[in-house]
Image (cartoon, rainbow, N blue to C red):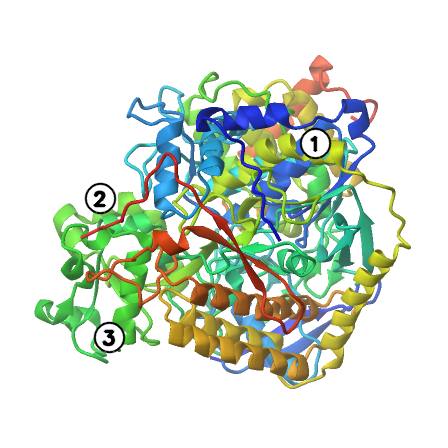
Amino acid sequence: MRITLHIWRQRNASEKGRMVRYDVPNVSEHMSFLEMLDVLNEDLIGKGEDPVAFDHDCREGICGMCGCMVNGIAHGPLAGTTLCQLHMRKFKDGDELYLEPWRAKAFPVVKDLVVDRTAFDRLIAAGGFISVATGSAPDGNAVLVPKENAERSMDAAACIGCGACVAMCPNASASLFMGAKIAHLGLLPQGQPERERRAVAMVAQARQELFGSCTNIGECEAVCPKEIKLDVIARMNGDFLKAKWTGRGALGDEG
Amino acid sequence: MELNSNIPTGPIETRWDRQKFNLKLVNPANKRKHTIIVVGTGLAGGAAAASLAELGYQIKCFCFQDSPRRAHSIAAQGGINAAKNYHNDGDSVYRLFYDTVKGGDFRSRESNVYRLAQVSLNIIDQCVAQGVPFAREYSGYLDNRSFGGAQVSRTFYARGQTGQQLLLGAYQALERQIAAGSVEMFPRTEMLDLIVIDGHARGIVTRNLITGKVESHLADAVVLGTGGYGNAYYLSTNAKGSNATAIWRAYKRGALFANPCFTQIHPTCIPVSGEYQSKLTLMSESLRNDGRVWVPLKKDDTRPPSRIPENERDYFLERRYPSFGNLVPRDVASRNAKMVCDEGRGVGETKLAVYLDFRDAIERLGRGVIKERYGNLFDMYERITGEDPYQAPMRIYPAIHYTMGGLWVDYNLMSTIPGLYVIGEANFSDHGANRLGASALMQGLADGYFVLPNTINDYIASAKLPKVEASHAAVREAESEVASITRRLLEARGTRTVDSFHRELGKLMWEYCGMSRNAEGLQHALAKIPVLREEYWRDVKVLGTGEELNQSLEKAGRVADFLELAELMCLDALERNESCGGHFREEFQTPEGEAQRDDEHYSYVAAWEFRGAGNRPELIKEPLDFEYVHPAQRSYK
């Protein structure tokens, strides 16, 4: 099949970018989306043109490194699927696709489809952990975890940190990402001591990173490749409010 | 060079305790004065960086991905072994030790494996405390499942995403230390050389992948947790970025490389669909519990599987291994699939696949039961291939999955370069010639959380580490070496892309140093690889500059190293005139076609020393002694 691509080309963070049209005439339906880009790049290198930069690593939907907007939808049209797991048979011969990098102030473009997502790491560094030094843990079965809590915690922990939620949100909010971590840890007994502090610290950091606020639109849930549910945001808000009411988790005056 | 493995003596049960007592410590106040570099942020590197920072060391941590959370440990599915014996089913530290030594086909060190089994207990505790959402029973207790190579239930898991959850635990511990200021993190930064001063590892040269800036980082010790080298084969289950550059440059600076030919091939992967194929995806081998493996009896049979009558099918595993049938171990299943495809009986467009058929199981158990057992795997298969495995048999083929070989390390995980430590898949230490399922995660975390933080103090406390300036001649030399490689790659201005060379190398390795090997094929590969390498440096085409994000340039450096490492892998495979674990030499098999070890001549670790470009590396042997588990033949008939 023949696919026409319009790809955002931008040399680096400071230069202006633009859409450039490319034809990929020999696409096999069995190719993954990224393999189609590989084919395009091999062709571009052959012609002496700069290949398209895009992030990717595991190519099996778990590392969270890949992703771009495909016709305005983060990770493309197939629900619950990262870009690397999207295959060309989901498209038709002659389709025209518009590829853009994640759109968010907190994710500045590095080059072409590559963006800087280190803001996500700083959100985790702010509070997305349980403080336990190596060697100080009790026996694994010393603290019981109800099966249902373990399952719900795992649902949230499945987040791969790809950033699709932020890219799709009109507010560029990181609430689904933060909520997923807050729910993952907050549903486990081990995560209780730092629960309020965690919510306050992560929300404060999100503000510094210029992520927007959540206004319950739900685009994030719709594009999440791991199908994380909106209720994690409710948990985050609950933990945050409780921290504020009780005065626990105070970090200073940023709340 | 004399290899000293520094293995403590005495009863194996107390060796690790005695070693910890005998190693020197560093006073907490003094730890702050020492900087340690950790390269790689997977289970081993991430855990080590976090744990060393907790101890008080100043850590500089590096990864080539955009975040430490992306390391390929994240893709591990099945689980992690630990000898908890929570099920009262006869498990013990000794049994895990025994299973691992035997599973490794008697080519690993007993002392290391025993320690691994011991600290497996602490790993689970640590991960639970970090918030890893392991599967639970209704009672709230930890759940377990069984895995290959063991008769007890000792595998802990978090759905099919155990690696992801364990890695996030290590990543979060690391981020906590970054926030505390004890770890300085350098994402999108690739190590391109090791700085060795007066015989000690004192730093690394890196390239910032966004700006292209080449920099040196100096420290008192360097830890490599940079993973395996399966991508030498181009197609593997590794991530696209997984590479051998860090360990290879360390090898060229004097670290010995051990057992490079020990690679693991996983039998059930989704096969290659075309030339554009960029990687291979694993399907859990649990599918072989209900699926039957077959190919047509006739060569080049192009009929769809449903049109091939029963008497024209060859269920080759059931035929050749009547007692184990479709459940033979990984290496046997893989080799047999290759054999029937080599005979021209492979299926699918590329003829490099065999059927894994659920028709009989669906008839016997009903579609519902099969869906319950394997639903997610069937969905994944359909997403990738577009075929419905409930209707037509799956097509599967083996793929490179893991490398047991790696840099040689002593019992303290130090390489032959003082101050250079190597952990996780990057070292060679614990799996011998074959790794058991759910043991890679165990080893990575054992090294990172519990072994290295106890052994590295001894070096810091006892080594003379004079202050090193960035202007030191060795630093300058390493930097200019890196600059010269980059320049040569950019200035070749040839006609072929990096990927085209990598693919060609991969095919060669897969053909001659893959699932089964023979002297003639290895000699052929050893003749071809230098020719390909020469062509590479002359004809590779890398566009752009070194002063920007240049993904072709990144790949070009890694492929240049694979082109050298591949030769060492073939040399090692040729030198080892026996079959053991993942290393199957066709000349050395029992009359039934099983691997035939030669304990009399090959019960050693083959450690290779770099002797300069163009020279044959020198083989140095570390003999293996088995005091507790006595070598025996494995049979699956």
- CA gap, disc 1 to disc 3? 57 Å
- Chain to which the residue tagged by mark 1 belongs: B
Label 3 belongs to which residue? B345
- Is residue B325 placed above or below B150 in the rendered structure? below
Determine crowd level at label 1: few under 14, some 14-19, many 20+ residues with C-alpha closer than 10 A.
Answer: some
Secondary structure under the numbered disc 3 in the rendered image: loop
Determine crowd level at label 2: few under 14, some 14-19, many 20+ residues with C-alpha closer than 10 A.
Answer: few
- Chain to which the residue tagged by mark 2 belongs: B
Decide if residue A121 is on the left or right side of residue B438: right
Number of numbered discs visible in the structure rendering: 3
- CA gap, disc 1 to disc 2? 54 Å
Tell me if residue A128 can be seen. Answer: no
- The residue shown at (38%, 29%) is B94
Q: Quadrant of residue A128?
A: top right
Q: Quadrant of residue B174?
A: top right
Label 1 belongs to which residue? B457
Q: Position of residue B288 (x, y in %)?
A: 26, 52
Q: Position of residue B290 (x, y in %)?
A: 22, 50
Q: Position of residue A240 (x, y in %)?
A: 67, 24
Decide which of B435, B615 is in the foreground and name it.
B615
Label 2 belongs to which residue? B369
- Chain to which the residue tagged by mark 3 belongs: B
Residue B218 tag number:
none
Decide which of A72, B235 is in the foreground and name it.
B235
Q: In the image, what residue type sits under mark 2?
A: Val
Q: Are marks 1 and 2 on the same chain?
A: yes
Most extreme residue toward the left is B311
